[in-house]
Amino acid sequence: MTFKPFSRHNIGGVEVVSPIWLAPLAGVTTHTFRAWHRKMGAGLVHTEMVSAVGLSYKNRKTADLIGDDSEPGPIVLQLFAPDAESIARGASLAVRMRRFDALEVNMACPMPKVTKKGSGAKLLEHPEEAKKIVSALKDFDLPVWVKLRITDQNQHPLTTAAFCEALLASGANLLMLHGRTPAQRYEGFANKEAIVDIAHTFPGRIVASGDYYAPADAQFYLDGGCVAVLAARGSLRDAYLIPRTHAALGYEIPETMTNPTTGDQIDALIQIGREGIAHEGERFTLVLIRRMLSGIFKGFHGASAIRQMCASCTSWTALEDSLTRLRDDNSVRADRNLAQHTIMM
């Protein structure tokens, strides 16, 4: 992929080629999902949220989230833990397993299974411990980033600006700020203006997160002073969101990524499936494909029928065979509109 020149190549201590990044998503941003969005031009990807305590207990499933050095960067490890000692112990194990470009602490997850143990967004209520966590990670000679949410004056001791200032003073290189309070979880709307206000307060230090579903959303954040934008649930709604955003920003992007034919979209799902089988196995691959269907097959007549066909397949072999037959049909090989095509199972 060829990009126009990007003026800020170093963000938060990491060299990047684009300010549009893939966010960490629990149960989603596996090796396969990261590989797809890296191919789509993501300037940086994240692991899933990894339990530092789980790593310390040598939990195999937790360790599997780390991946290995066969995967290109830049990639950021996101850890969660309730205290500095736990985060440092988990980070020490993780960096022995593979290379990372930065270490990131999750202080944003609002889900009870995380917060009831003192991790995630619960740390917004304990700024002193949050500062200790950041300081502890500075010992690993990697950039330290923090993912957090805007605070609520009725629940949290510090304003968003004051909490951000405390983290930066403790050594954080970059902050990923989500525009919802923990109480909102994932409901309502992200407060984009609040993120932009903080970006103006701390120039060069704020990455935007929340309600990025269209190129215009990313443009708003970048125009508002954010140095990068995280593609999260929007990357599931539209598998081509990142390249479409790059095109809107003036990057030179192939049409296969911004206006893919039906055949292009079928090829994409086949590639994703093969990658998944190789790295996560059949069961997870079928689950991931079902989650991605509406974000890949869209914008043409017959897309719903293809989605239904894919969702009904119980094995990768059957699904790949069906997709291959459909792709090779002359009526869909290059057309940008699947006109009245009947899917044969």
Image (tube, rainbow, N blue to C red):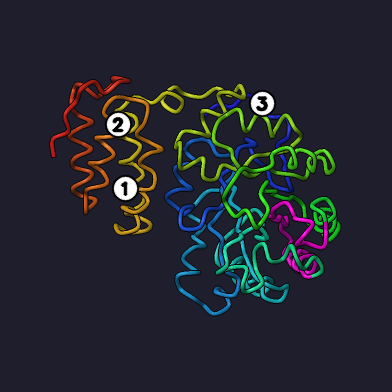
Q: For the residue carrying disc 1, how many other residues have a C-alpha within 10 Å: few (<14), some (14-19), or many (20+)? A: some
Q: Residue at point 45% right, 73% down?
A: 60
Q: Which residues are magenta?
A: 129-158
Residue 165's quadrant in the figure? bottom right
Whichever of labels 3 and 2 marks the residue nearer the N terminus, that label is 3
Is residue 32 something that shows in the picture? yes
Packing grade of label 2 (10 A; few <14, some 14-19, many >=20) is: many
Q: Amino acid at mark 2?
A: Ala
Q: How many marks?
A: 3
Q: Residue 259 location, x and y as percent? A: 42, 23
Which numbered disc, 1 or 3, marks the residue that appears first in the sequence? 3
Q: Give the amino acid type for the residue marked by disc 3 in the picture.
A: Pro
Badge 2 is on which residue?
A: 303
**Does residue 284 sit above or below 301 in this rendering?**
below
Q: Quadrant of residue 121?
A: bottom right
Measured Cα–Cα span from mark 3 to mark 2: 36 Å
The three-letter code of the residue at mark 1 reads Arg
Q: Quadrant of residue 256?
A: top left
Question: Which residue corresponds to the image point at 31% horizontal and 52% vertical from the top-left?
Answer: 286
**Upstream in sequence: badge 1 or badge 2:** 1
Disc number placed over residue 65 in the picture, else none: none
In the displayed structure image, the side of residue 243 where residue 86 appears, left or right: right
Kindly identify which residue carries mark 1.
Answer: 274
Front label number (1 vs 2): 2
Of helix, strand and loop, which one carries label 3? loop
Q: Give SS at disc 1.
A: helix
Q: Which residue is mark 3?
A: 5
Asked if 38 appears above or below 169 in the picture, the reply is above
- The residue closer to the viewer here, 10 or 184, is 184
Residue 135 lies in the magenta-colored region: yes
Q: Which one is closest to the eye, mark 3 or mark 2?
A: 2
